[in-house]
Image (cartoon, rainbow, N blue to C red):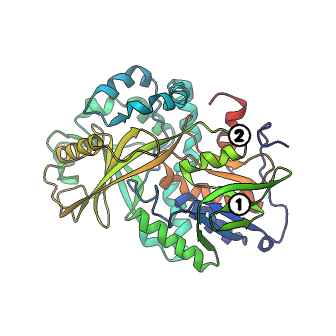
Amino acid sequence: MPLNGEIRIHVCTGRRPDNMTRHVVVVGAGIVGVSSAIWLRRAGLDVTIVDRLAPGTGTSHGNAGVLAACAMVPVTAPGMIRKAPGMLMNPDFPLFLRWSYLPRLMPWLIRYVSHANDTDTRRIARDLTPIVSDSVEQHKSLCTDLGLGDWVTDSDYCFAYRDRAAFESESYTWELRKQAGFTPTLLDGGEMREYEPNLGPDITCLAVMKNHGFIRSPGGYVQALAQAFEGMGGKIITADVKDITLADDTVTGVETTQGTIACDELVLATGVWSKPLMQKLGINVPLEAERGYHVVFEDATGGPSRPTMVASGKFVATPMEQGLRCAGIVEFGGLEAGPSKAPLALLRRQVHEAFPNLQAKNEIEWLGHRPAPSDSLPLIGQIGESRVYTAFGHHHIGLTGGPKTGRLIAGLIAGQGINTDLAPYHPQRFTNRKA
């Protein structure tokens, strides 16, 4: 069938019982790609990862490190359209736009904000829940048997508010989290100060989520997973993928800067850079690069002792191996432009307001690009009967949902049973309806 034809859902796609005779190429050496590759090797397939960068040095390096099991509520909640102009014009709100990029952004933006209603928000939250809600368990299943369990730290995940009124102003989001099984414990007054003494005086309420976790060095973690994958007999090639080779609408290989690599199945797991590869298959995915910033305060003191989302600044502060990493600023401006000064300045100011006693030896800045589909749902599944599988578009939940996504993709390719309904994530959903 043509690649841009009707949607068909394939649950069992393994065609040959001898998995070792099948070669799978995974494009992308971030958390999703490496997780997919490990689970594919465990299923007995021959696997090669291809990426232009070394494992764990792209977007998977620069996140807040939280295994955010409760992060199923999309940004596009009801009221967003009304609030958006004020957000963009407010220099203290962590949303930035390079105005010269607006004409290119507009088609995606119109589709994105069209979901800012109750019906779509509840649907998206319901569909994201299976990908994120068991994140800690999925990471442990991925890494523990490889001897890498120490990378995963069990912890609470806190949301810091100015007061209870500020917490209650987000009751819509918290109700959706509650429906997914996540209810916070509220702390204030002396109890809050004893629990997290380094918070500034303007923060008087904490919503504490139990049974979460974080990765003490996301980039180092993915690199360790990649090394373990090689130890399992997997292969990693540093190259840029230029094209996908098809015969009768079925993949036969990928063309790279290191030559053509033959394969029986192909997994696209290279984040926002998956879009041009999808276009080569005749599918135009409404996917935009969300420019995300972080600052690492090296060898920091005076910060939080566990991952903390500061609601007023929409950033997360996580104590990591290198120091305190603060991440969360969002900017729309495409893939080509360099870092902007204003987002980093705002992040630093908000960090020091939230943690006035923070001191650090040095500061390290980072800018990366998160893949944002117009409907806030990742693309997970097979394109037609092409044996090309998608595993990208995770927006803010790439680290959180990477191992689960990799496990699902491996199950599809290996012909194993899949207990998750993958229809909401189908890679051809944009060709049949507005999303």
Front label number (2 vs 1) = 1
Residue 4, x across and y down, in percent: 76, 39
- Of mark 2 and mark 1, the one earlier in the sequence is 1
Residue 169, x across and y down, in percent: 33, 28
| Amino acid marked by disc 2 | Gln
Q: Which mark is residue 428?
A: 2
- For the point 48% across and 36% down, the residue is 74
Q: Is residue 392 visible?
A: yes
Q: Are marks 2 and 1 in contact (CB under 8 Å)?
A: no
Q: Is residue 9 left or right of residue 124?
A: right
> Does 425 sit above or below residue 415?
above
Residue 422, x across and y down, in percent: 68, 45
> Does 198 sit above or below residue 16?
above
Of residues 416 and 54, which is closer to you in this image?
54
| Amino acid marked by disc 1 | Val
List the residue tagged with mark 1.
Answer: 254
- For the point 13% across and 53% down, the residue is 357
- The C terminus is located in which quarter? top right
Q: Is residue 219 left or right of residue 279?
A: left
Quadrant location of residue 12? bottom right
Quadrant location of residue 160? top left
Q: Is residue 328 left or right of residue 432?
A: left
**Badge 1 element:** strand
**Badge 2 element:** loop
Residue 9, x across and y down, in percent: 77, 44
